[in-house]
Image (cartoon, rainbow, N blue to C red):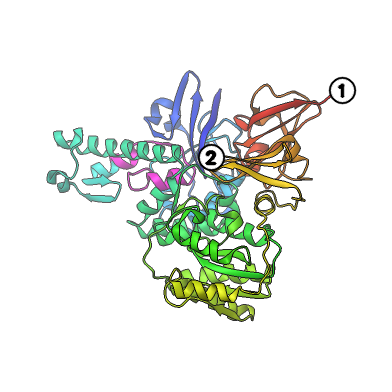
Amino acid sequence: MSRYEAVKRDGLARIGTYVEGETSVSLPAALDTDALFPALRERPFSNVPLGADEAFVRDYFSPGEGQPVAVHPLAAPAESGDCVLVANWHTAQKNPRNYAGWLTTLKESLPPDTAWYAPASALPSTACLLVYSGFDLFDYRAVDLASAEKRFCLPEGEFPASLMETAVCRCEGCRDGDLVRHNRLTLDRELALVRHYIEVGRLRELMESRCCADAAQVGILRFLDRSYTFIERSLPVARAVPMRANTAESQNRAEIRRFADRVIDRFIPTRTDVAVLLPCSARKPYSLSRSHRLFVNVVDRRAHELIVTSPLGLVPRELERVYPAGHYDVPVTGYWDREECAFIADILIRYFAAHPYRRVIAHLDGGALTVAQMAAEACGFDLEVTCQGHPTAPASLRALNDALEDERRMQADTVRGTVSWQFATDINTRGLQVRGRSMQMAVLRGKQQLFSIDAGTGLFRPTFEGWDLIPEGYRVKIDAFVPQGDVLAPGITDCDPRIREGDEVLVEGPLAVATGRAMMGADEMLRSKRGVAVRVRKTKKIAE
């Protein structure tokens, strides 16, 4: 009897435990798979090329008996708990388009609670990509073959064996002149590093740095990013660590597109017909920076404040604490290339099409101003520019104040803006107030608490009274039981398809309701037979 359970996720990558008989294995890892699956070497008809046509697969492919279960993009017969073997996956790594297509097909066909084995595929230079793609289990065949070919393996690539003599590595294998030992240890070390990055929620950053050494891996990452619907549903809605957007590939992260799409499609801005576009700041949230304290004082609630930034595009002031707006870091050069400008201008164009203003004032310079001008030209409105030199220069601040002189003041509705972005709904915020300091903030109506605010992510955590304001959505349906702790996947009967890992959810059942945080996305909740689906904070029985 086999069993797999993921305990930590970072997109498609997982840390989990696979149990086969009396053997329990912590993944991701490279192992002697002949010992784990002794009958595998004698199995026929599992090694079918990934690109084989449907007729060939139908006539010749066999999943085999026992574990692992062989699968193919055109044949995926596995069940929950299985270890699935994808033969010839190393051939996909040189064809980025097929890699993304085959991976998407397999992931959508197979239960999410299966362990994934890529035989003869893992090198130190490819291990990060394989785990990022959702593979868990590897063997040493690829590195042993590299050793036989006198190749010295590092995460940066494969080199002539003579490099061992240059002291570039001081592992046990290198000290003993044992190339096989070095290559195996390097694979183990890379997988341990990958595991650490999963644990801290930063595997994407490692993936971006690793892929730069190989054009095919860059292509694979780009094709996976273009598969937005597939990738986005596996990504958490928020992370506890900063998002470091240090490469050009960062702009294509699904999390960045999701934030922008929610700003355009879900976010309900504060009621005003005047917008002022402001530059970002190195310090997050922006309002803690010196420059934004100046901007806030000058604007003085006379316009809706929108921050133009790369790579997020546009951050309304109401959302400046929400992940990733309050948690990203980028290299500051003052230069925005054409691709970057076009990407951010498109976000502004879509936003202004959805939310037109009577006046748009650009208190910007450099690339941010160029982007605003591109958006204004595309949308057909006049852009008022108030910068005279640097945005914080006295002359610039005076010009901004003069431009807003006759505008009436209004109160920014942070609660409405955040709830609309997070839960895709509009609520009546009359009488609601945000109280407390930065680490302990809450939304109250009188003395009744409706939401607490997660200091780490900026997301709202509804109480039962808060959920009463949210009429629908982000619900998880369960069977007739009262949760005694967390809700496991087998107890879930239905859920909102928009739920992502990290979302706040309301659990509803015939006998009880509960509020908590989703530990899986909706797709995994419904298709898994193991694992914690909702981390429950509070449960309430339903009176009979």
Could you say which is closer to the camera, residue 150 or residue 339? 339
* Number of other residues with Cα within 10 Å of mark 2, as a class: few under 14, some 14 to 19, many 20 or more: few
Q: Which mark is residue 544?
A: 1
* Number of other residues with Cα within 10 Å of mark 1, as a class: few under 14, some 14 to 19, many 20 or more: few
Residue in the picture at 59% in, 44% down: 75
Give the percent coordinates (x, y) of residue 105.
58, 50
Q: Which mark is residue 396?
A: none
Amino acid type at mark 1: Glu
The Cα atoms of the two marked residues, 2 and 1, are separated by 39 Å
Check residue 132 for magenta coloring: yes
Q: Which residues are magenta?
A: 122-144
Amino acid type at mark 2: Met
**Label 2 element class:** loop
Could you say which is closer to the camera, residue 216 or residue 542? 542
Residue in the picture at 74% in, 23% down: 482
Check residue 65 for magenta coloring: no
Give the percent coordinates (x, y) of residue 458.
57, 46
Q: Earlier in the sequence, mark 2 or mark 1?
A: 2
Residue position for label 2: 439
Find out whether the residues at labels 2 and 1 contact each other: C-beta distance under 8 Å.
no
Q: Quadrant of the C terminus?
A: top right
Residue in the picture at 51% in, 35% down: 8
